[in-house]
Amino acid sequence: MTTLTALHVGGPTLFLRWAGRAVICDPTFDEPGEYPGGVTLRKLTGPAVSPADLGPLDLALVSHDQHADNLDVAGRALLGSVPTVVSTTTAAARLPGVVGLEPWQALPLGDDGATVTAVPALHGPPGAEALTGPVVGFLLRAPGAPTVYVSGDNASVDVAAGIAREVPDVDVAVLHAGAANTGRFPEPLTLDAERAVAVAGLWPRAVVIPVHADGWAHFTEPVDAVVGAFAAAGLSHRLRVLVPGEETAVAFAR
C-alpha cells in the first residue's frame, strides 16, 4: 500500500503526495492583503511555503475559482505549470486549460487506474448557490492507495452523507472547516466544528485533516475549535492537525 504525505500551506491549501503524484488543493500563495468584490475578503497570513518549495506538481484540485480564499492571484499563475487542473465546469469556461467536471463525473489520471471524481458541495445553507456560485469537492482513488475525500467549501452534512452512501470506504477526509461567514447568511459557508464532527462520523475509520480554518478574517472558528469538538466527541485519535509548512506522513486504517 502506498503512503500519503500532506503539507498544509495555509487556509484551504493542502499539498499531497498521493499514488505517486504531487497534488495541490485550492492553491493560495499570495501574501496578506485584501480582495475587493461583492464582499471584501481579507487575508491575514501568508503561505507557509512557496510553490517552488513543493517542486513539480502533477494535479491541482480547485473546488471553485470565484473566491480568492480558494484561488488567489499567485494560485492562478501556478495553474499554468500544472499538467492537470480539475475544477467546476464554470471555472473551466473562465480558466484556460482547466478540466471542468460535474458532480460524480470522473477523470482518469493515468494508466495505473487512478481517478479523480468531482462530488457535490454546497457553499452555505440551501439556496446559497445563487450568491456563492457552484462548488465541488473531490474523491481521489487509485489501486493500493488511500481513498481521499476533499470536501471543498461544503457546509452541508446532508451533502456529505450522500457522498458517504455512494463511497463508504474513504480513508482520509480533508474537511474545509472554519465556519466561514461573510455576513450574507445566518449559517456558515463552510463546516463549523460541530458539523465537521458529524461529517467525520459518516466515515468512522477515516483520518480527518482539517483545513480552511485559519488565515482569513471571514473564517470565524480557528482550528482549535475543531480540536475541541473532536475531543468532546471522543474522536481526537482520528484528527490530524498539520503544522503549516511541515510535510507529514499520514497513517490510515485499511
Image (spheres, rainbow, N blue to C red):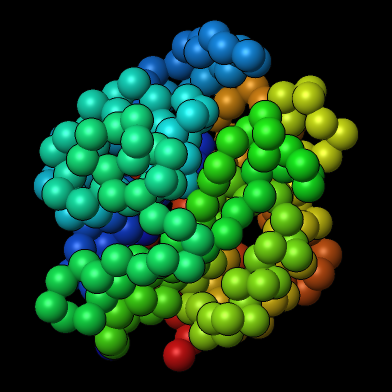
Residue at 51% across / 13% down in the picture?
35
Residue 199 figure quarter: bottom right
Q: Residue furthest bottom?
A: 254
Reply above or below: 68 against 134.
above
Q: Tell me residue 181's x, y (percent).
A: 73, 30
Of residues 231 and 95, the one nearer the viewer is 95
As drawn, is 185 to the left or to the right of 172?
right
Q: Quadrant of the C terminus?
A: bottom left
How many marks are shown on the rendered structure?
A: 0
Residue at 77% across / 73% down in the picture?
234
Of residues 226 and 219, the one nearer the viewer is 219
Q: Quadrant of the N terminus?
A: bottom left
Residue at 45% across / 16% down in the picture?
32
Residue 54 figure quarter: top left
Reply above or below: 213 against 162.
above
Reply above or below: 182 against 148.
above
Q: Tell me residue 146's x, y (percent).
A: 38, 78
Reply above or below: 113 against 129.
below
Mark yes or no: residue 53 visible: no
Residue at 83% across / 39% down in the picture?
187
Q: Tell me residue 246's x, y (percent).
A: 35, 49
Mark yes or no: residue 63 visible: yes
Q: Residue furthest right?
A: 186
As drawn, is 57 to the left or to the right of 142?
left
Q: Tell me residue 248's x, y (percent).
A: 36, 60
